[in-house]
Amino acid sequence: METVIDPRAELIATARHFYQQGWMVGTAGNLSVLLGDRSFWITASGVSKGELSNSDFVRVYPDGRIETASPHLKPSAETDIHQLIYHLFPEAQACYHIHSIESNLVARFVVGDSLPLPPLEMLKGLGVWEENPRCTVPIFPNHLQVSQIVAEICDRFQINPPKIPALLIRNHGITVWASSPQTARNYIELIDYIFRYMVAAKKLGIEGENNN
């Protein structure tokens, strides 16, 4: 009989790693993984991401039903964003959101609704195989009501899907999605590298790095 591996183990390990990087301090951030029936496990609201256990997750079903280990647990405040990502991008199997310092800094580098990225080699790891690529990350306002953020993401992506599987919420953080939890973890690390490069380049006064 084939052994089914609980996907929460991967999320626990990833959350601990992200916590140690300073990307999920306090109870910030959220991770989810899609299951075969199109339900998904997502980190519960208000729990430390450095000390997760299997009971710190909420299972969300396509019809909106939730399953928890405790009646006191609630799904992450950004659950609807994850649900939208899985709906808009059927190939997505994992969705990760972190609150890194660099993701908030770079969102302030522009006043518009997209962030140009420098043509770094790291973009290949995000699926961009072009010479001197012109690539951007879409930026959305951080509304108090998550439902408003969800509506704006939906409206924009239905018309203009992003070139790379990532979005920024200004003064909030970065969200990525991928075809596996391992790939989503790689995407977070790659994008954080690019953002750290952009912050360093700005400090050094390096011009012409952001494909403006």
Image (spheres, rainbow, N blue to C red):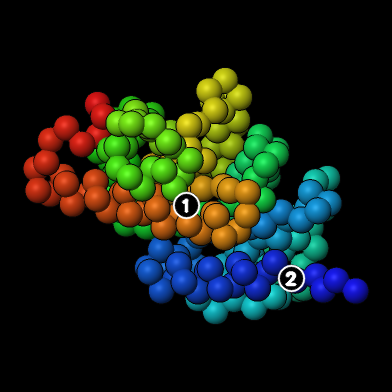
- Report the residue marked by disc 2: 6
Which amino acid type is marked by label 2? Asp
Identify which residue is drawn at 60% across, 44% down: 81
Taking 13 as reference, is 111 above or below it?
A: above
Location of residue 8 in the rendering, given as x and y in whole percent from the top left corner: 68, 69
Q: Quadrant of the N terminus?
A: bottom right
Quick one: SS at disc 2? loop
- Report the residue marked by disc 1: 187
Which amino acid type is marked by label 1? Tyr
> Looking at this view, is 94 or 148 the one in front?
94
- Can residue 169 be seen at all in this image of the molecule? no
Taking 142 as reference, is 42 above or below it?
A: below
Check the image and name the residue furthest to the right. Answer: 1
Identify which residue is drawn at 79% across, 49% down: 38
Taking 196 as reference, is 8 above or below it?
A: below
Say which mark, if any, is on residue 50: none
Q: Quadrant of the C terminus?
A: top left
Identify which residue is drawn at 80% across, 63% down: 67
